Image (cartoon, rainbow, N blue to C red):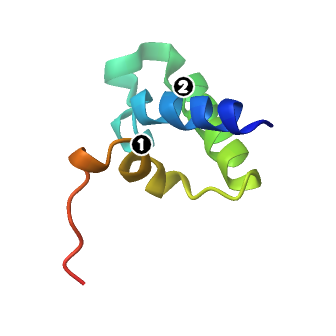
Amino acid sequence: MTDDQLNALKIAYTYMPQAIEVTRHEYGDRYAIVLEHIETVRAALFEAGIDPDEVAGEINPELSPNSCY
């Protein structure tokens, strides 16, 4: 994967719903498929050495809360 492709994947991931937000009420019968898609993208990020939980702060640092450590 090129750097541009990886960056595009990171950007797309930041706009995906978080798994905890995906419910049958919101997504109907497709909720399981949406969860699978989210997991597929997370796995691709992990394989590229990227922590998916850190992507949003990297892509949009101005929206990321400051650490108090």
Which disc, if any, is residue 69? none
On the image, the x and y values in percent for residue 7 come to: 59, 36
The residue tagged 2 is 34
Q: Secondary structure at mark 2?
A: helix
Judged left or right of residue 60, residue 10 is right
- Residue type pointed to by label 1: Ile
User: Which badge, 2 or 1, comes first in the chain's sequence?
Assistant: 2
Residue located 20% across and 59% down the image: 65
Residue located 40% across and 18% down the image: 27
- Numbered label tally: 2
Q: Confirm or deny contact between disc 2 and disc 1 (CB under 8 A).
A: no
The residue tagged 1 is 59
Q: Secondary structure at mark 1?
A: helix
On the image, the x and y values in percent for residue 50 come to: 62, 56
Residue located 25% across and 84% down the image: 69
Give the class, few, some or many, for how many residues have Cα within 10 Å of label 2's Cα (few <14, many ≥20). some
Residue located 32% across and 22% down the image: 25
- Residue type pointed to by label 2: Val
On the image, the x and y values in percent for residue 54 come to: 45, 57
Quadrant in the picture for residue 24: top left
Give the class, few, some or many, for how many residues have Cα within 10 Å of label 1's Cα (few <14, many ≥20). some
